[in-house]
Amino acid sequence: MRISFTADKADERLDVFLTRMQPEFSRSHIQKLIAGGLAAVNQNIRRGNFKLKPADNVELEIPEPENAEILPEELPLDILYEDRDIIVINKARGMVVHPAAGVYSGTLVNALMHHCDDLSGINGEIRPGIVHRLDKDTSGVMVAAKNDQAHLSLAKQIQEKSAFRIYQAVVWGNIKEESGTIHGDIGRHPADRKKMAIVKENGKPATTHFRVLERFGEQTLVECRLETGRTHQIRVHMTYIGHPVVGDPKYGTDRHGRIRGGFTIRGQALHSEILELTHPVTGERMTFKAPVPDDMAKLIAKLRR
């Protein structure tokens, strides 16, 4: 896969620039790609220490991961439902969904490959069976496809919004409205490429509906339903309206997960609670619910007291 960028700073090193543009890759990985002749500036192969000028055209070739790196692993899975066509799991917070650059083990895909005899191959060797994703630090219910027929059906349902997820989140502050809708195009943060943000240019449309479930004074428990599935969408949108998710290390405040009384949640208080879909073969309408993680449940219980 070849991707292109336009340099925006004078005298920035090529390896530093590409690391900033591709935050999912480590700098050492970027340097390996450059050393392999996979980076070019104005169509000329350059070294990592090459100094860029504003408006330089930078191209990076990202090779596909070798199939041999994606191996089955015996990892714990919280399975909510399984048949010959689909498997529904409650993904643990901290588990990456599928392999990516520098992360080829310990993922949900590695676990599914060990557990299942077969998975849909539509998304290729690196993401077999994966129809939709959850952030690494978001827990909750998600479905994977065991064959291509199931995959195509589920993907169409997600696109047409007949299949959907409902999230629970504890956010900072007391939301005044009982419910609301957040609109805002989401793209890379202009100053921090490791984050997403509401942007005016080069973003993708995103809409989040929220409803207040409980108020705790300094925090609010909300239910969120997405019309779109952008990267970090709920986290970005709630931060945008001034109510970041409790415990969010990327979009939260310096308070992170610490609340009054010293209770701390390790990770963001965001959970995909409900998944509703139509079974791709039987046509049965199905609803799956995953309980919130123990520490999030304890957080809510403490706030209620």
Image (cartoon, helix red, strand yellow):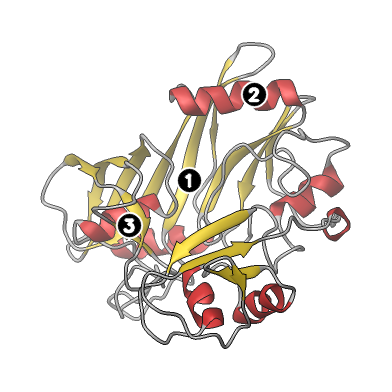
Q: In this view, does 208 lie to the left or right of 45?
A: left
Quadrant position of the C terminus in the picture: bottom left
Find numbered disc 1 in the image and state the secondary structure of the residue it sits on.
strand
Tell me the mark number nearer the camera, choosing from 1 and 2: 2
* Residue at 78%, 52% in the rendered image: 111
Task: Please name the residue that numbered disc 3 is placed on.
Answer: 236
Residue 94 on image: x %, y %:
59, 64
Q: Which amino acid does label 3 sit on?
A: Val
Label 1 to label 2: alpha-carbon separation: 22 Å
Can see residue 92? yes
Tell me the mark number nearer the camera, choosing from 1 and 3: 3
Label 3 to label 2: alpha-carbon separation: 29 Å
Label 1 to label 3: alpha-carbon separation: 16 Å
Which quadrant of the figure has residue 10? bottom left
* Residue at 15%, 42% in the rendered image: 178
* Residue at 36%, 51% in the rendered image: 234
Q: In this view, does 134 lie to the left or right of 67?
A: left
Which quadrant of the figure has residue 205? top left
Find numbered disc 3 in the image and state the secondary structure of the residue it sits on.
helix
Task: Please name the residue that numbered disc 1 is placed on.
Answer: 272
Check the image and name the residue furthest to the top.
Answer: 283
Mark 3 and mark 2 lie on one chain; the one further toward the N terminus is 2
Q: Is residue 22 left or right of residue 268?
A: right
Q: Which amino acid does label 2 sit on?
A: Leu
Circle number at residue 152: 2
